[in-house]
Amino acid sequence: MIHLATIGTGWIVGEFLRATRQAGGFCYTACYSRNQQKGEAFAQQWDAQKVYTDLLQMAQDPEIDAVYIASPNRLHYAQSKLFLQNGKHVICEKPITVEPEELEELQQLAAEKNLVYIEAMIALYLPQMRILQGAVERLGPVHMVRFDFSQYSSKYPALLRGELPNIFNPAMATGGWMDLGIYCLYPAIMLFGVPDSVEAHANFLESGADSSGCVLLHYTDKLVVLTYSKAAQGVIGSEILGEDGVIEIPHISKLNNMTLTLVGGQRTSLTGEQEKYMQMANEAAAFRNFIEQPQLNRATYRYVCSINRAVSSVMKQVRDAAGITFPSKQDEDILFA
């Protein structure tokens, strides 16, 4: 049984805890929140045994084996490093780190300590991804791909009122590309590999965060177009266009309800509908297996780490091309406040 701690009290943490219950093999041990009352309410809701408002104390708790990190992006590196240094396995929400160099450093640290350190990205573990990879082989030569994740943010009205939610605050290393664009990039790299070159353009808000953008991934034999927006709701989804057919993907982040239509009109349903926590159960199960059966799952773990690195590298290339920048890091004492 893996004794799990969590950082954050947002809805995604609740979904991950539901996922761990579905996967099995976890005991929810401790929750961290900057606010004691909020932490206690969350712990009571999900039956956590302990509540921490001090991250160092939680990292040093000998009863904790692993941590799930769902804090703002800017905090991921420092918090992951703290828990790895204290011998805890880490699964961290996307993006796992802001900079590729940070990811490489922490992967090395995890390897030295025989710990698991992975990004919480459901596409890596979904059976639906295996189905999609098989369907792509039926398309014949693929020359054009269009992946879109445009979702009107629940925090956008607050921004329009003059507030500054974390998700639109560059100081937290957030914005549309980091939050939504990554869901488009993962399947692109998993299906087609690292692109030969990258072009990117973004629209910016008064806060300095990017609200939407367009990314062009150049391959020798194809173009992959990635679009995203946090200020508008998309409805047409994504497509992979081959000479022998097309795959329609209504929700690129979930791969639900995909269809394959071959030239001539034959249409096949590839996947159905599945709730998010059920999909997250796949990554929770993989995290458990990497920890409990490292030898048996070594090849899969190495693949996951390599994809994490490839995505992180291209994420940075896109930011550079689009002019997406973040302020310099703050002092770690502030980060943990």
Image (tube, rainbow, N blue to C red):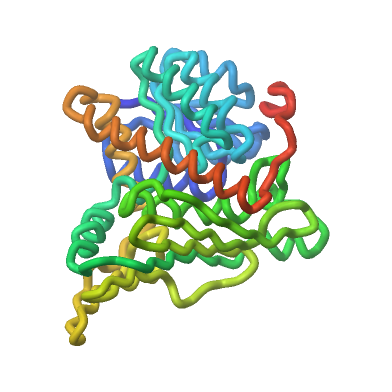
Find residue 232 and report its image quarter: bottom right
Count of marks, rendered view: 0
Q: Where is residue 317 in the image (x, y as percent from the top left)?
A: 55, 45
Tell me: residue 190, above or below residue 55: below
Tell me: residue 27, above or below residue 150: above
Residue under the point 46% across and 56% down: 217
Horizontal side, residue 201 vs residue 30: left or right: right
Report if residue 44 is visible in the image: no
Q: Where is residue 311 in the image (x, y as percent from the top left)?
A: 44, 43
**Residue at far right of view:** 162
Report if residue 108 is visible in the image: yes
Q: Position of residue 169 (x, y in %)?
A: 72, 47
Q: Position of residue 164 (x, y in %)?
A: 76, 52
**Residue at far front of view:** 220
Quarter of the picture containing the N terminus is top left
Residue under the point 25% across and 66% down: 141
Residue under the point 43% across and 15% down: 87
Q: Which of 65 and 168 is in front in this view?
A: 168
Residue under the point 25% across and 60% down: 132
